[in-house]
Every structure is written in structure tokens, then in C-alpha cells.
Image (spheres, rainbow, N blue to C red):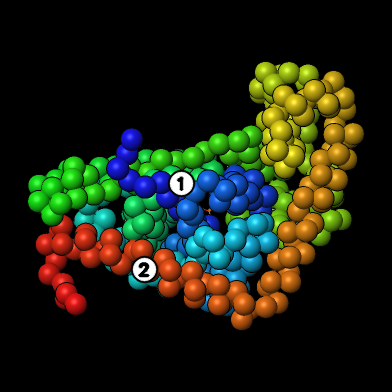
Amino acid sequence: MSKFRERVFSGVQPTGGVHIGNYLGAIKRFVAMQETHECIYCVVDLHAITIWLDPRELEAGIRMITAAFIAAGINPKSHIVFNQSQVAEHAELAWVFNCVARMGWLNRMTQFKEKAGKDRENASVGLFAYPNLMAADILAYRATHVPVGEDQKQHLELARDIAQKFNTDFAERIAALGYGEAFFPLPEPLIQGPATRVMSLRDGTKKMSKSDASDYSRINLTDDAETVAQKIRKAKTDPEPLPTEVAGLEARPEADNLVGMFAALDDVTKAEVLKEFGGGQFSRFKAALADLAVAKLGPIRAEMQRLQNDTAYLDGVLAEGSHRARALARPTMDAIKDIVGLVRQRS
Ligand code: TYM
């Protein structure tokens, strides 16, 4: 048994909309975890500014993700929903972690390489240090479980390395101040379900992404029913009928992706989907997938729209959530200051 109480933390960036990959890989699973855990869900706006973003788009994006969280079923009264920049402890702890993490560790981050592209010299320092801020998000609450999509795995491993190094570097001090053997838990990534990596609808070997130039590559939570159905109809497939067994999806990335999306939307396994559609043509399966996607996403879209028209309500949720988040993060940050030896005011 760990001495740390189980606590869930996760975040979504308020950049460029929100797609079915974010929903199935993360947000839908955030909703489910509310049943069993104390959860903290964060709109990570400080992460969003690591790449230039129009301020008006950022404001709208923060409210959009907040609306998506609530419309999908996150309850901001029983759990915490807030935006990162309103809790200064995230940035404060990130600085400490900038001094714990090693250049070599960050140099290995594949997401930085992808996002910075060829022009690394011109990438912001924030983009490089991004994973340290992510570790701070999680560890400011000493969170133990982090539901994310597959693409965040490496960042979560780094967060564990940072927690471990902090615990080791300051072991004596941690023990002397009465925190026992470890101050931070090693947060566990929860990468589960049939849609941990939803792929582009245009190319089954590429991750579905907010930044893909083609809007036909993704289904946005803001797409209307006709658009969702059309995108699924046009999704790339291969000429073979669907396989009857899951093993038959290997080396068929587009088929695998659509079957995974169906399974995740319907809360069943890929095997169950293939039991129904295996051996059949894509046309019938795609029609069923479109109906299912519209049935599941339609109500979320409608509720998002309603909420986005009520900015006073959304801003109130974020203010209240930030207040509650800060009440948890501040004592942790004070303890960290004591451990590191940063003299602070005492009330
Ligand atoms: P972000 O905003 O890119 O994505 C939010 C969540 O959606 C998941 N995701 C996907 N899942 C399946 N298929 C896809 N195609 C897909 N695309 C995105 C992501 O894995 C993520 O769970 N660095 C994070 C945000 C973050 C964070 C944190 C997460 C900041 N601090 C602390 C957890 C804990 C990010 O950029 O996610």
C-alpha cells in the first residue's frame, strides 16, 4: 500500500479546438474516473502559450475546453475544474523542476522534436521545458493517477523521473521534516481502452491532431451531425472487408482505427465490434459508426454550445475551481520550499 492517497490529475490544452481523439483518449475517461476517485481536471493554458497563440483564441479556447469537460459529464462541484494560470503554484513548482530535470532527459522528448521541427533554434524555451511544467501540474497535488492518451506516455515517464530525483536529492531533508521516505508519489499513467491513440481519418499511420492542416483528418466535438457523417463516409479505408478477428486488424491501420473508435464510443471491445461487423463491407460499418458518433457526440456538442454562450458561468466555474485547487497546491508548495531550503513567510 502506498502512503499517498489516490488522486487523479489530468489536463487538456486550450489550443485549436477539441477532437474525438481528445474525447475518447482522455475526456471520456476523466468522466468515468469521477466514480472512484477524487479528480482534478485542468485547462492547461500555460502550456498553450509555448507556441504563439492569438490572445482572443486562447480566451475562447479556455472556455471551450471548460465547456467540453462539463458537457461530457465532468461535475465541477464534486471534482475540481480550473485553468492552470489561475494557480501560480504550477509555474512556481515548474521552476524548481527546471532545476531538477536534466538537459539530457528533455533532449530525448519526441514531442519537442516534432513540435519544434527543423527550426529548433527558433523554438521557445517554454516549449523545451514544457514537460517540467507538466510534471509540476501533477505533482503540485501529489496526484497518483494520470489518465492520458498514448502520446503523453514519455512525458509521464519524465514526471516520474523528476519525482524520483527530487525524492533522492532531498531524501535527508524529506525525512528530517517528517515526510518519511518520499515526498512525491511516482504518478502512474493510465493509458487504457480501445482508443488510446486515435489516428487521422485521412492516414491511419498518423495521429489525429488539432494541428493537421486537413479538417477531414479529425472529428471535432463542435462538428454538426452532417459534418461528422460526411467525415466518416470519406474516411480512408482499404478494399478488403472487415476482419472477423482482432488479429486481422494488424497492418490495417485505417480499419483498426475506425473499429477502435466504434468500440470506445459504444463502451465495448474491438472483438465485440467485429462480431457484429466482421466479414462485411465498410459501407455498412461506416453508416453505423456515423450514427453512433452522432448519437454520442450530438448532445455534447449542443451542451457545449449552450455553455459557451454563458461565459459568466464558465468563468465562475474556473474561479471556484482555481480557489479549491490552490488550497491543495499551496501547502504542497510551502512544504517543497521547506525541503529545498527556500526561506518563506510563516503566518
Ligand atoms: P493535449 O491537449 O494535446 O491532449 C489532451 C489529451 O488528449 C489525448 N490525445 C489523444 N488521445 C487519443 N488519440 C489522439 N489522437 C489524441 N490526441 C490527444 C492526450 O494524450 C491528452 O491526454 N501535455 C498534455 C496536457 C497536459 C497534461 C498535464 C496531461 C499538461 N499537463 C498533466 C496530463 C497531466 C497535452 O498536450 O495534451
Q: How many marks?
A: 2
At x 66%, y 53%, the residue is 19
Q: Secondary structure at mark 2?
A: helix
Q: Residues within 10 Å of mark 2 (few under 14, many from 20)?
A: few
Q: Nearer the viewer, mark 2 or mark 1?
A: 2
Q: Which residue is mark 2?
A: 327
Image quadrant in which you'd find residue 309: bottom right
Q: Which mark is residue 146?
A: 1
Give the percent coordinates (x, y) of residue 211: 60, 55
Q: Considering only vertical position in the picture, is 261 above or below 231?
A: above
Place of residue 92 in the rendered image (x, y in percent of width and height, measured from the top left): 29, 66
- Determine whether, in the image, residue 261 is placed left or right of residue 63: right
Asked whether mark 1 lies closer than 8 Å to ligand 1, one says: yes
Closest to the observer, 184 or 324: 324
Badge 1 crowding class, 10 Å Cα cut-off, few under 14, some 14 to 19, many 20 or more, is many
User: In the image, what residue type sits under mark 2?
Assistant: Ala
Residue at 77% x, 64% y is: 302
* Percent position of residue 1, x then y: 33, 35
Q: Quadrant of the C terminus?
A: bottom left
Which element is circle 1 on? Answer: strand
Q: Earlier in the sequence, mark 2 or mark 1?
A: 1
Q: Tell me the quarter of the picture where residue 91 sits.
A: bottom left
Please give the label number shown on residue 282. none
Q: Nearer the viewer, residue 156 or 73?
A: 73
Task: Give amino acid for label 1.
Answer: Val
Q: At 28% from the left edge and 61% from the top edge, which residue is drawn?
A: 332
